[in-house]
Image: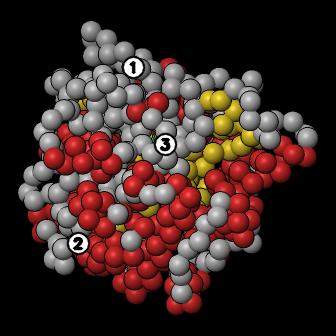
């Protein structure tokens, strides 16, 4: 499979899942630092909309050291990044996606002056990447809202949080525009209405249920404005920088050709996959917003000036995370399966991962086609991969054939989309790159990386890094793809 020498191959992680050192050199606490791992908590069983309760949140803030919180330790990238980047370089990647922990730069989120130590960490890391010829794809916010902004301001539903985020953007754009080529303001911005605690720092149980949708969409509106603001300031600071619109993309199929199913799937696709892209790419709310807002009784505040900001500052590439697909039907009694942010119905033609996410490489090709045909903008795939229980052998090996199979079949379908369907895909960063703490369950044993990290769920282990079989496969695949 040839992709050409300019294609971006890389890996993707987030600050909160990889860095650790959650309280050093002035760093404040973020929402990810509140996710405890314990035998008494099964995150998978807690509804996504109310993943964090006020009771649990307050208890963590009151007793911050009671319990084990894996994302506070990550996999110690903060101290080991030079060694890790050396491995990335050996792998042959030319792009690395990570995020900036807001709380390293503004520990509480509402300060006016940044923490210089935090800025220095990222600048040093970016210089290290640059010295290896690795381009940086930066997510500004990847589930890293300061807990102070959640407690005192109620998260992104509050306009003030948007104002604080603009100050954060001003600082990092000024400092890092010369290092970072590709920008994404919010990881999977559509998470705002699937897991609002992760995406917007909102704890819904504090509000009357009839207002939940308005609260979530108001928060999302401020994030659209923040994205437009990032586009606006980068246009002035550095025209070489590109801002992408990123969503979690879940290919969906209707169950049968009953028009009721077809319409249900259309609505799902609009709301799940296209709504946020439409706003960030076309610069305005799409026509079907009327239906969604009516059906969900949503009311948001906005002004002509805000709508002008959206219209004049649109994104220049599309980015997606793609893991699985699901089936949609008007019949609610079908068997449900898990997925990244959502759960849909079972597809009898597909197998699932151990965590129940349906594996669908052709759904990936289908997604890339749909996106390209609608938006006609370059696509950067910023997440794709599989969570597996890996076995670390006595001779320090990991024979992860299932991961190789997953990556290879998805990359083949991406190749088909490019070569056969004419889709403009410019890059692919597989999710995980090295084993990190899982976002949804805070486990270490759900591993995505091609680099094994000797660390268990509770942080035991040497933290040494080892090349899995998939590492050697990926290195060869990249070399041969040029
Ligand atoms: C994406 C997130 O939704 O899915 C990542 O952007 C996350 O942060 C990835 O890690 C996989 O999910 P999980 O829960 O298996 O880590």
Category of crowding for the residue at label 1, using alpha-carbon neighbours closer than 10 angstroms: few (below 14), some (14–19), many (at least 20): some
Numbered circle sitting on residue 48: 3
Quadrant of residue 173 within the rendered picture: bottom left
Who is closer to the viewer here, 38 or 254? 38
Which residue bears the numbered disc 1? 390
Q: Measured from the top left, where is residue 419 in percent x and y?
A: 71, 49
Who is closer to the viewer here, 97 or 144? 144
Ligand 1 within 8 Å of the CB at mark 2? no
Q: Which quadrant of the figure contains the N terminus? A: top right
Quadrant of residue 409 within the rendered picture: top right
Image height check: is 398 above or below 341? above
Which residue bears the numbered disc 2? 110
Measure the C-alpha gap from mark 2 to mark 1: 41 Å
Residue shown at 65% from the left, 29% from the top: 336
Q: Measured from the top left, where is residue 109 in percent x and y?
A: 24, 67
Please state which of the two labelled residues, at mark 2 or mark 1, is closer to the viewer. 2
Answer yes or no: is residue 328 visible: yes
Image height check: is 90 above or below 350? below
For marks 1 and 3, the one nearer the N-term is 3
Please state which of the two labelled residues, at mark 1 or mark 3, is closer to the viewer. 3
For marks 3 and 2, the one nearer the N-term is 3
Left or right: residue 481 compared with residue 166: right
Label 2: element kind: loop
């Amino acid at each position: 499979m040839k992709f050409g020498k300019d294609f971006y191959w890389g890996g993707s992680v987030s600050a909160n899942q990889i860095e650790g050192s959650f309280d050093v050199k002035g760093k404040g606490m973020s929402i990810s630092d509140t996710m405890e791992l314990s035998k008494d908590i099964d995150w998978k069983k807690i509804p996504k909309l109310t993943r964090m309760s006020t009771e649990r949140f307050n208890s963590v803030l009151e007793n911050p050291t009671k319990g084990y919180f894996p994302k506070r330790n990550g996999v110690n990238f903060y101290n080991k990044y030079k060694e890790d980047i050396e491995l990335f370089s050996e792998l042959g990647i030319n792009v690395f996606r990570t995020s900036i922990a807001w709380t390293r730069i503004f520990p509480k989120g509402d300060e006016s002056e940044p923490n210089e130590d935090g800025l220095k960490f990222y600048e040093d890391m970016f210089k290290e990447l640059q010295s290896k010829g690795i381009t940086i794809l930066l997510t500004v916010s990847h589930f890293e809202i300061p807990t102070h902004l959640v407690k005192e301001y109620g998260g992104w539903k509050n306009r003030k949080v948007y104002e604080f985020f603009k100050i954060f953007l001003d600082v990092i754009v000024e400092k890092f525009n010369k290092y970072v080529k590709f920008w994404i303001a919010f990881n999977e911005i559509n998470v705002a209405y699937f897991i609002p605690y992760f995406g917007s720092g909102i704890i819904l149980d504090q509000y009357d249920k009839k207002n939940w949708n308005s609260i979530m969409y108001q928060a999302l509106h401020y994030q659209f404005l923040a994205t437009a603001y990032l586009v606006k300031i980068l246009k002035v600071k550095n025209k070489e920088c590109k801002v992408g619109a990123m969503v979690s993309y879940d290919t969906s199929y209707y169950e049968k050709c009953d028009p009721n199913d077809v319409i249900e799937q259309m609505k799902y696709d609009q709301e799940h996959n296209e709504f946020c892209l439409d706003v960030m790419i076309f610069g305005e709310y799409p026509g079907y917003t009327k239906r969604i807002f009516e059906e969900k009784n949503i009311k948001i505040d906005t002004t002509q000036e805000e709508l002008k900001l959206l219209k004049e500052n649109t994104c220049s590439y599309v980015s997606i995370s793609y893991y699985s697909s699901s089936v949609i039907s008007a019949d609610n009694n079908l068997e449900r399966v898990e997925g990244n942010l959502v759960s849909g119905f079972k597809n009898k033609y597909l197998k699932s991962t151990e965590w129940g996410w349906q594996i669908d490489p052709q759904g990936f090709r289908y997604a890339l086609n749909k996106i390209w045909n609608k938006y006609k903008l370059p696509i950067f795939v910023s997440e794709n991969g599989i969570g597996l229980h890996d076995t670390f052998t006595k001779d320090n090996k990991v024979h992860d054939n299932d991961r190789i199979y997953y990556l290879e079949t998805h990359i083949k379908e991406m190749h088909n989309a490019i070569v056969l369907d004419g889709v403009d895909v410019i890059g692919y960063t597989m999710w995980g790159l090295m084993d990190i703490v899982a976002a949804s369950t805070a486990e270490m044993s759900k591993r995505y990386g091609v680099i094994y990290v000797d660390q268990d769920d509770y942080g035991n282990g040497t933290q040494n890094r080892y090349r899995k079989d998939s590492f050697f496969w990926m290195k060869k695949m990249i070399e041969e793809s040029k």
